[in-house]
Image (cartoon, helix red, strand yellow):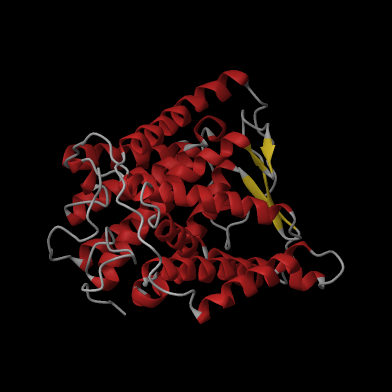
Amino acid sequence: MSFSRRPSATRNIDARAALAALVLGAVLVWAAPLAGLALAGRPLAPYLAFPPRTAQVAHAPFSWAVFALLCAPLAATLGLYGAALLRARPAPRQPAVARFPRWGWLGPALLAAGWLAAWSDSLVPAAWRRESFSVLWLGYIVAVNALVYRRAGRSLITHRRRWFYSLFPASALFWWSFEYLDQFVGNWYYVGVVARGDWDYFLKATLPFCTVLPAVASTWDWLRQSPRLDALALPAVNGGATLACLALVAGTLGLAGIGLWPDGLFSLLWLAPLFILGGLQKLLAGETLFAPLMRGDWRPLLQPALAALVCGLLWELWNSGSLAKWHYSIPYVERFRVFEMPLLGFAGYLPFGVECALVMDLIARAVERRALWPLLAGEPAALPDVR
């Protein structure tokens, strides 16, 4: 099955509803864990420090039983991808429509400079090494957009500027929310970071955090240039307001519990915000990014999840040789490391990618008054540019 890139209809998008979903989602993510602790009579002060910081925490040891149990949903997800790829009926691959743009060469240059600075022990001062991650990821973002431009004649940088550039500040807020949630579960912590105080730490951390959503968005757009990946199809599924309410309640309760049972509920750090955002978007905006699933088009779900996994592999690769870096401490599955990440931990990138897509869609509705999907960058030239 193949899908047209052109939207089926022009709709009036309520920017206020999208903004309300973002704000209310942020409030619930912040308040739900605190409410859980308060109901249990636990102190809240340790979780209210600015900026959020985490230290190494001792967790439950590796368990084959839990490892196998958590492998089951991952196996089911991989089965979905396999089935979707088998059912895909890709359109013939078209030749590239443009040359690699001149601005695109800035990407490989920044990427090479950032990588060299991140991993060099003697050529680059330590202070530069600690700040190289942002340069590296900016280079990646520019390079991937240039590859998309060469293939499609359009890119997020050139044809979705207002939305794409708004992802940078939104990305910082988005990832700081996960830093906040990590205080309750203690699944990762940082080493090698040198800061003169809280505000210095906040500013130094915010710069690389700004690149998360743009990197996932750019990778998603790049994946769409593959005819097979842009024809992922599965049986249609339906979901209404009742399912949205259940998702919202489940996500809120899940976050309320992570501070009380961090070892048992640590995976909800990645799943609960997804339920909250998806539920809020349906209830407040009337539809979600996943509406195409009702006609068997699973690309809005499967593509961003894969994009985040691609980015995750690169995040972990480049982190492994960096001076300022993160380590993991995850209960029950702390084995079979790939770089710093336990193997099963990579599964968390799949729901994280869908969360990124939901946030990106809500931002598109708020700043451009149109839905993100299917309007990424590879659209027909007749579609108007939003700059």
Residue 355: horizontal and vertical position, in percent?
39, 50
Q: Is residue 358 left or right of residue 381?
A: right
Residue 331: horizontal and vertical position, in percent?
62, 32
Comparing 201 with 6, the one in front is 6
Q: Residue furthest top?
A: 65
Residue 210 visible in rendering: no
Q: Is residue 293 above or below residue 192?
A: above
Residue 356: horizontal and vertical position, in percent?
41, 55
Comparing 174 with 134, the one in front is 134
Q: Is residue 178 above or below residue 383?
A: above
Residue 352: horizontal and vertical position, in percent?
45, 48
Q: Residue furthest right?
A: 122
Q: Is residue 20 above or below residue 186?
A: below
Quadrant of the frame with the N terminus: top left
Picture quadrant where residue 384 is located: bottom left
Comparing 198 with 161, the one in front is 161
Comparing 334 with 224, the one in front is 224
Residue 274 visible in rendering: yes
Q: Residue at x 34, y 67 (%)?
A: 377
Counting every numbered tag in the picture gives 0
Q: Residue at x 34, y 46 (%)?
A: 301
Quadrant of the frame with the C terminus: bottom left
Q: Is residue 253 left or right of residue 288?
A: right
Q: Is residue 190 left or right of residue 208?
A: right
